[in-house]
Image: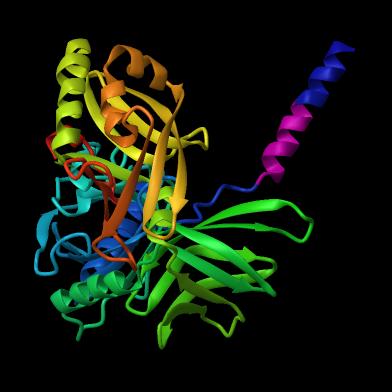
């Protein structure tokens, strides 16, 4: 019996060998050679764009800050960078490399003052994000596509899709960046009404993202965030936006009389209309940041007391502070404090009353969240918020640099002209140093 099994086993081996064809190499080159050829081809594509590439760059894995235009021109070893985040006549050179790492990768491998602003963990570089993270952008990208018409990248850290297209040869970089900056100044708004599918939906803007909250066909409240990048003609969205069944990929700016608006490309019926709410509504609907240097005499006295007798004593530094909504959805004085290792955040809640269009009354609600109450009791944050309420209620008259899109709002105490507080729309890091 054992002999029969052995013979059967041998026959099986012979049949397998005789029926199994000889393996053939389907590729002419080894995998290492193919990879090298792919990288060389990509480098040729990058270099052959006569006037460089326009990169639609999105930092942050959630595209929190929207997109930014970056201009990049490649040689054998160097890349020249310009961007709308820098003065239009400034460029910066650095090196780049192409390598294999689970696919072809483009790396901006030496520090570039312009490009690495998006990925620098020092948030003071960009003025955005938390310290140790910054804007959270990439400097290493997987190459998904590489042709003369376009290069598609994917951020290794964020996973964001980055599109590069050739810059026309007749385009002057300085003029183009300057025009982008002018377009951004003209087309930046805080609030919109979105006219779509027979509804008018309020829209607010956070950095370069449209925040849209509406009731869908099923009666449920939906909030969508639509990051965009500024173009010469309007807003190009990171991905299509669908509201009430209407899909939009890009908005084009228009103006009729005093009305400024955006209409979708592709013949889509919808309109994004800019609205200018009263200044006090702008104040309480956004996050407005403090600077020590922008406080009046009263504010400087109380804040300095909080610093010397509070923060300095516990060995910490105020990382940021703003009036606005906290993570708990409540309005008030929100802050983060840095102890040299990490951030401790909290809020002290306020109630407010809007008076007319340009006046607000603040009252401390005797409550807080996060570490807010601890800092109130142990780090003299009671002094820091005192100029806002004065122990009871304070009423402030509001002024701004630009009612269409204010970069700052000045609060002037109706009862004390020495108590002025200028708050800023852009995030301010280390307010005691600004």
- Total marks drawn? 0
Give the position of the N terminus as an image quadrant: top right
Look at the picture and state if 81 lies above or below 393.
below
Question: Quarter-wise, where is residue 163 in the image?
Answer: bottom left
Main SS of residues in magenta: helix
- Taking the image as shown, residue 157 lies to the left or right of residue 268, namely left
Please give the name of the residue rendered at 14% of the width and 18% of the height, measured from the top-left corner: 308
Asked if residue 36 can be seen in this view, the reply is no
Q: Nearer the viewer, residue 265 or 350?
A: 350
Give the position of the C terminus as an image quadrant: top left
Please give the name of the residue rendered at 72% of the width and 31% of the height, measured from the top-left corner: 13
Question: Quarter-wise, where is residue 194 in the image?
Answer: bottom right
Determine the residue located farthest toward the front in the rendered image: 415
Q: Where's residue 167, x and y in %?
A: 26, 77
The span shown in magenta is 10-20
Answer whether residue 93 is magenta in the image: no
Please give the name of the residue rendered at 20% of the width and 82% of the height, measured from the top-left corner: 171
- Taking the image as shown, residue 176 lies to the left or right of residue 242, namely left
Asked if residue 161 can be seen in this view, the reply is yes
Q: Nearer the viewer, residue 390 or 246?
A: 390
Q: Where's residue 46, x and y in %?
A: 25, 66
Answer whether residue 17 is magenta in the image: yes
Look at the picture and state if 294 lies above or below 270.
above
Q: Where's residue 349, x and y in %?
A: 44, 31
Please give the name of the residue rendered at 26% of the width and 42% of the height, measured from the top-left corner: 415
Determine the residue located farthest toward the right in the rendered image: 1
Look at the picture and state if 432 lies above or below 31.
above
Q: Where's residue 278, x and y in %?
A: 42, 62
- Taking the image as shown, residue 165 lies to the left or right of residue 173, namely right
Q: Nearer the viewer, residue 371 or 385?
A: 385
């Amino acid at each position: 019996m054992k002999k029969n099994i052995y013979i059967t086993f041998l026959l099986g081996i012979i049949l397998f060998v005789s029926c199994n064809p000889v393996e053939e190499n389907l590729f002419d080159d080894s995998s290492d050679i193919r990879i090298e050829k792919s990288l060389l081809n990509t480098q040729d594509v990058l270099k052959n764009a006569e006037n460089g590439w326009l990169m639609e760059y999105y930092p942050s894995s959630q595209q929190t800050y929207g997109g930014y235009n970056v201009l990049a021109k490649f040689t054998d070893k160097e890349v020249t960078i310009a961007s709308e985040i820098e003065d239009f006549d400034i460029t910066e050179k650095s090196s780049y490399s192409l390598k294999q790492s689970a696919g072809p990768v483009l790396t901006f491998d030496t520090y570039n003052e312009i490009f690495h602003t998006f990925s620098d963990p020092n948030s003071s570089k960009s003025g955005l994000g938390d310290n140790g993270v910054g804007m959270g952008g990439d400097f290493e990208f997987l190459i998904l596509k590489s042709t003369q018409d376009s290069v598609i990248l994917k951020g290794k850290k964020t996973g964001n899709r980055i599109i590069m297209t050739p810059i026309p040869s007749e385009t002057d970089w300085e003029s183009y960046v300057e025009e982008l900056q002018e377009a951004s100044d003209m087309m930046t708004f805080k609030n919109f009404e979105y006219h779509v599918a027979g509804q008018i939906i309020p829209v607010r803007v956070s950095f370069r993202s449209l925040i849209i909250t509406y009731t869908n066909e099923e009666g449920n409240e939906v909030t969508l965030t639509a990051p965009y990048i500024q173009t010469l003609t309007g807003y190009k969205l990171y991905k299509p936006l669908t509201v009430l069944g209407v899909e939009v990929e890009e908005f084009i700016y228009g103006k009729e009389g005093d009305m400024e608006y955006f209409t979708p490309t592709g013949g889509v019926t919808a309109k994004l209309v800019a609205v200018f709410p009263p200044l006090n509504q702008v104040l309480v609907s956004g996050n407005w940041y403090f600077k020590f240097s922008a406080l009046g005499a009263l504010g400087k006295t109380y804040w300095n007391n909080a610093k010397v007798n509070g923060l300095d004593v516990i060995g910490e530094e105020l990382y940021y502070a703003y009036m606005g909504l906290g993570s708990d959805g409540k309005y008030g004085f929100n802050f983060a404090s840095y102890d040299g290792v990490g951030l401790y955040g909290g809020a002290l809640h306020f109630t407010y009353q809007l008076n007319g269009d340009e006046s607000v009354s603040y009252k401390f609600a005797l409550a807080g969240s996060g570490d807010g109450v601890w800092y109130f009791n142990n780090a003299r944050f009671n002094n820091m918020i005192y100029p806002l309420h004065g122990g009871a209620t304070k009423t402030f008259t509001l002024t701004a640099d630009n009612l269409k899109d204010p970069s700052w709002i000045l609060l002037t105490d109706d009862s004390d002209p020495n108590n002025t507080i200028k708050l800023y729309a852009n995030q301010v890091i280390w307010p005691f140093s600004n």
